[in-house]
């Protein structure tokens, strides 16, 4: 009798379970099931649109070959996913991106500069949630800082470079001037050497060789290793701080090269990038010229063609900061614009993680660039010149994270030029820069 009762109870429980389980699953676990399905990134198929700048392969001369090869590999690994690349150039690309951000006609992924990250952060997907602590810590601190807004990763860094000083060793030898030991020199040592390298080469009574030259232009930071050498900061905690003793001292040092020590051509501050570079690499009338790592291959090729000269790479002169310093905006990164489809967003992140795998970071030597990952330190083991640049990355300051940086940069570069040309004192130039920056800040 008891056995029959138990059997009936179990039968009833089983029937209730069979009836209720589908209802429970549909109404109570529907969200969980859908969420898990969305998070499976391999379920998403479709087209991802990416814009990108040309990145010259120093071996083949290809301008988009590096990114195109990665796209093909990713598509093979992810059937049904297609990466549509639209090339943009360095001159018009930033304007095209700004227009796209203003009109909403955006790609899925695009290369971003600091000012675009800060202007368009509300349109960008924060990506730090897709990177665990170990993954975030795998990036170099400068690279990570360049893509942060409000302490969140707004883009994924992919490669980086910096500025350093190139030395014409043949001119140094000809004038009996010792190059800086280990590539380091103080400002005073730098000045003494520049004086000896400023001379009348053809004995016609006119100076035709100079120790140093460069150019002043927004978005280029070739001379900023001198301007910041005494410890000045452009921004601190979001506030403009390029004024005061250390900033004035740095600006005085740059101005003195032309106006006090006269170790630069008289048109330093007027000459453009092409003119200044030509004086160094072709005319060989300049002993020291600051620029990026791209110039190493150009100068080496000229040597191979019998047209060049022996050269070395050195740090910027050391000032009161007591270490060499450089300023650079050359952290390349990719941002993802807002996505309605979570599966597509996850696939975009997967692609950017794919691009920054260690094995592809090790291919950056093809572009003359440097890894953004901490653990890759032997990329240029057999190239002492590129290794010197790589060492300089630890002394590199990334351009400030500010939504008005483009305007601030333009103001600063203009006032620096006016001081260099003697049209304003360094105090007047700094004060005017400060006034203009505060004025645009107050418009926020």
Image (cartoon, rainbow, N blue to C red):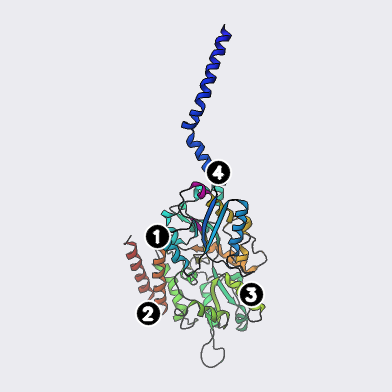
Magenta residues, as a range?
334-346
Q: Is residue 210 above or below residue 440?
A: below
Q: Position of residue 253 (x, y in %)?
A: 46, 74
Between the C-alphas of marks 4 and 2, the distance is 63 Å
Q: Nearer the viewer, residue 154 or 109?
A: 109
Instruction: Rate crowding at label 2 as few (under 14), some (14 to 19) or many (20 or more) other CA atoms within 10 Å.
Output: few
First-in-chain label (4 vs 3): 4
Q: Quadrant of residue 8?
A: top right
Q: Which residue is mark 1?
A: 103
Q: Are marks 4 and 2 in contact (CB under 8 Å)?
A: no
Circle on res. 199: none
Residue at (62% x, 51% y) in the render: 77
User: What SS does tag 1 mark?
Assistant: helix
Between the C-alphas of marks 1 and 2, the distance is 41 Å
Judged by depth in the image, the label closer to the viewer, 4 or 2, is 4
Q: Position of residue 366 (x, y in %)?
A: 62, 65
Judged by depth in the image, the label closer to the viewer, 4 or 3, is 4
Q: Position of residue 428 (x, y in %)?
A: 35, 74
Q: Are marks 2 and 3 in contact (CB under 8 Å)?
A: no
Residue at (42% x, 54% y) in the render: 123
Between the C-alphas of marks 3 and 1, the distance is 45 Å
In the picture, the quarter occupied by the C terminus is: bottom left
Q: Which residue is mark 4?
A: 40
Circle on res. 423: 2
Q: Nearer the viewer, residue 296 or 182?
A: 296
Instruction: Rate crowding at label 4 as few (under 14), some (14 to 19) or many (20 or more) other CA atoms within 10 Å.
Output: few
Query: Magenta span has 283?
Result: no
């Amino acid at each position: 009798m008891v056995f029959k009762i138990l059997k009936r109870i179990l039968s009833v429980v089983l029937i209730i379970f069979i009836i209720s389980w589908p209802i429970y699953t549909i109404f109570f676990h529907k969200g969980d099931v859908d969420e898990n399905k969305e998070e499976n990134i391999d379920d998403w198929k479709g087209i991802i649109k990416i814009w990108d700048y040309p990145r010259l392969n120093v071996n083949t001369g290809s301008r988009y070959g590096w990114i195109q090869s990665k796209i093909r590999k990713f598509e093979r690994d992810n059937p049904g996913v297609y990466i549509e690349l639209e090339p943009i150039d360095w001159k018009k690309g930033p304007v095209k991106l700004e227009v796209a951000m203003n009109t909403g006609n955006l790609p899925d992924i695009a290369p971003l500069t600091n000012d675009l990250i800060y202007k368009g952060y509300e349109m960008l997907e924060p990506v730090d949630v897709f990177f665990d602590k170990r993954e975030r810590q795998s990036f170099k601190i400068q690279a990570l800082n360049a893509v942060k807004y409000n302490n969140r990763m707004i883009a994924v860094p992919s490669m980086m470079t910096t500025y350093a000083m190139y030395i014409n060793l043949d001119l140094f030898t000809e004038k009996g001037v010792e190059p800086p030991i280990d590539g380091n020199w103080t400002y005073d040592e730098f000045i003494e050497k520049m004086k000896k390298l400023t001379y009348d080469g053809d004995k016609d009574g006119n100076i035709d060789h100079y120790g140093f030259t460069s150019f002043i232009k927004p978005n280029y930071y070739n001379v900023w290793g001198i301007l910041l050498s005494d410890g000045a900061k452009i921004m601190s905690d979001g506030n403009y701080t390029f004024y005061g003793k250390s900033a004035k001292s740095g600006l005085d040092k740059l101005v003195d090269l032309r106006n006090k020590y006269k170790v630069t051509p008289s048109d330093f501050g007027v000459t453009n990038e092409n003119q200044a570079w030509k004086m160094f690499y072709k005319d060989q009338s300049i002993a020291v010229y600051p620029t990026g790592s791209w110039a190493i291959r150009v100068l080496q090729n000229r040597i191979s063609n019998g047209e060049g000269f022996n050269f070395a790479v050195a740090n910027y002169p050391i000032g009161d900061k007591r270490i060499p310093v450089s300023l650079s905006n050359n952290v390349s990164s990719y941002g993802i614009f807002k996505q309605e489809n979570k599966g597509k967003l996850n696939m975009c992140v997967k692609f950017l993680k794919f691009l920054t795998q260690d094995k592809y970071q090790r291919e950056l030597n093809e572009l003359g660039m440097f890894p953004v990952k901490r653990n890759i330190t032997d990329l240029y083991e057999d190239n002492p010149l590129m290794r010197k640049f790589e060492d300089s990355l630890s002394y590199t300051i990334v351009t400030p994270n500010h939504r008005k940086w483009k305007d601030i940069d333009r103001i600063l570069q203009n006032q620096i030029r006016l001081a260099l040309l003697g049209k304003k004192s360094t105090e007047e130039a700094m004060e005017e820069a400060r006034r203009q920056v505060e004025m645009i800040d107050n418009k926020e």
